[in-house]
Image (spheres, coloured by chain):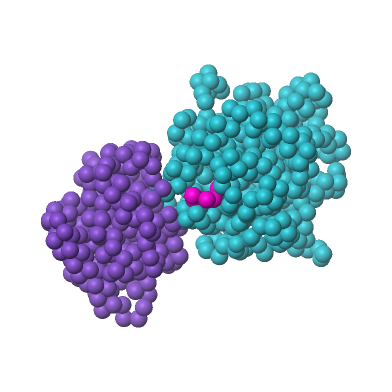
Amino acid sequence: MTENENTMKLPDEQGHYGPYGGKFVPETLMPALSELELVYTQACADPNFWEQFNALCRDYIGRPTPLYHAQKLSQKLCGAQILLKREDLAHTGAHKINNTLGQGLLALRMGKRRIIAETGAGQHGVAVATVCAMLGLDCVVYMGEEDIQRQSLNVFRMKLLGAEVRSVSSGSRTLKDAINESIRDWVTNVRTTHYLLGSVVGPHPYPMIVRDFQSIIGKETREQLIEAHGRLPDCIVACVGGGSNAIGIFHSFIREPGVKLIGVEAGGLGLGKGEHAAPLVAGDPGVLHGAKSYLLQDEHGQVRDTRSIAPGLDYPGVGPEHSYYKDTGRISYVAVTDDQALEGFKLLATTEGIIPALEPAHAVYHASQIAPEMGKDKLMVVNLSGRGDKDISIAAEVLGMSL
Amino acid sequence: MSSIKDIFNKKGHKALIAYLTVGYPSVEATLEMVPLIASSGCDLVELGIPFSDPLADGTTIQRASYHALQQGTTPELCLEVAQKLSAEVGIPLVFMTYFNPVHRYGLDAFCRDCALAGISGLIVPDLPPEEGAELEEISRSHGIDLIYLLAPTSTDERIALVAERSRGFIYLVSLTGVTGARDTLPQELESFVSTVRKRARQPLCVGFGISTADLARRAAKVADGVIVGSRLIQLLEEKDPAPKVRSFIESLRSALQIQSMISGTER
């Protein structure tokens, strides 16, 4: 890492991460983005805001989440000691709640009582519906028709929590189209509505705000490592769809050159076949959903359909900060296929009694491949960003089991 | 290449601007409809280059974009269509598209090819001035106007920013929302236009939601031009659209003319 990188503030004032990021949105939304940025800046400087956020993180989400030494898995792989950051144990079953809590509190500060959100796997939707119920806010969640079918448990949870789930039948009927519809709703209702974006994507200031709220994962991990092992890890592995759990855990270690950071994208059916969701590994720079970033697109700049067994990774774009770190080389990105992710899914269930979501199952699989190449004295952290209950029916179908 | 500013030069004349998605329902239809629209009293045509994720558009233009892409409409094809049309019609043509296809084509190559095809301007709804400096400079060097948008939510500061940088005209989004035919226009339209008028010297054209001669007339009361899109695309979806399109454009033209006369008398 260069000296410049060490001292540089990301993003810059215009919301750029090197050549990436920015605000590529219709004019109607520009004032709302400025308002959000202002309110966030004021909140950052207000100790009461963080006091409230931290208290709710502890009492409502159940933070800090454990850093669990997966000894049996480590022994089986005969390599690095694997530590699981247990975001699956956070309230609602995934890391998404960290950000929804933070943005929910910001919406209150802005006096916006209607919340809209997109969801892919339904984890973000559930986390938004949860926080809205707790804070007394109205909630509408946009979800692709295809995702509604494959994540029906989460659809039910959102409805139970009082949210309205709106089915999106345009385009590929997945996360990308749910974001399009959310933006259209926001353009229409911007004066009364906060768009609670769920990943480190979208126009500035979203990638920054979501990162900051998710960075609690990495801060805790760092403290837990120091306490239990007296040192920083050798490697951290996290799955990347939009990239919020990855940025969340990586952020506290970006300036530690000794810590290798690996982001795992969804390889779908395999990169060669073009049916995947791995923009950092196999895409190139473009503009989607308000930011410049790596993107899966055809030669004419049309956004390509994606494919992944994990709905939360099934997205053609990725956060601009990831794009920046790909170019600088600070974070390495790899892709893991659907079949490999299922192996990771089964591996963790059978060796540790933990059923991961299909999204972090990608990270688990990659960890299982590189751990044996590392010495037993090495420490590798895997961000277990969510639990797998929601994925039981997908997994059963693919694995040929009946429920 | 026809100059955009010329269409606003005739005193008291209100500009009529039409939007069509290239390749919808077919390239042949685009090639047939644009000359027809031009000869029915339209002053400028926006040709939409379809994009896979048109997030500022309502269902009508989403559907048109989707089908146009299914038909294989690419930016290259849109440039070919523009070249044919600009040789045939005497009114300026501008492209409306999202930023990614332009970015992918290459900003300089795109503007160069636009100029060769006789395109006079660009409207890129997801490119605010904050991100537009590069395209502004490149388009200017090729003699093409980059037209920025303002919305009812725009602050005074943003109005000043766009007033300083928009070329050709300023596209005023009539309402907080996406494109699409509507039955009414917001109450605040008049005050929005006059607020912008105080700060901008460019002509002001109002679009989004204008679907009838009545709404066009109301917008033209305060603006220098009106833009119709979704309603026109809906007409293209009907059987035997040519006479319907002609009579729709003519009805808008005469509504604007009546409005110009009334405004003229009031002055």
Answer with left or right where residue B56 lies relative to residue A176: left
* Residue displayed at 55% across by 65% down: A169
Q: B44 or A347: nearer the eye? A: B44
Residue A64 colored in magenta in the image: no
The shade of chain A is cyan
- Residue A89 x/y as whole percent: 79, 43
**How many dots with numbers?**
0
Residue A70 lies in what quarter of the image?
top right
Residue B25 lies in what quarter of the image?
bottom left
Q: A323 or B266: nearer the eye? A: B266
* Residue displayed at 37% across by 58% down: B187
Q: Is residue A307 above or below residue A376?
A: below
Q: A361 or A367: nearer the eye? A: A361
Q: Majority secondary structure of the magenta segment?
A: loop
Q: Is residue A208 above or below residue A346?
A: above
Residue placed farthest to the bottom in the image?
A: B239
Answer with left or right where residue A61 lies relative to residue A199: right
* Residue displayed at 27% across by 73% down: B248
Residue B213 lies in what quarter of the image?
bottom left
Residue placed farthest to the front in the image?
A: B266
What residue range appears in magenta? A190-194
Which chain does the purple colour mark?
B
Q: Is residue A6 visible?
A: yes
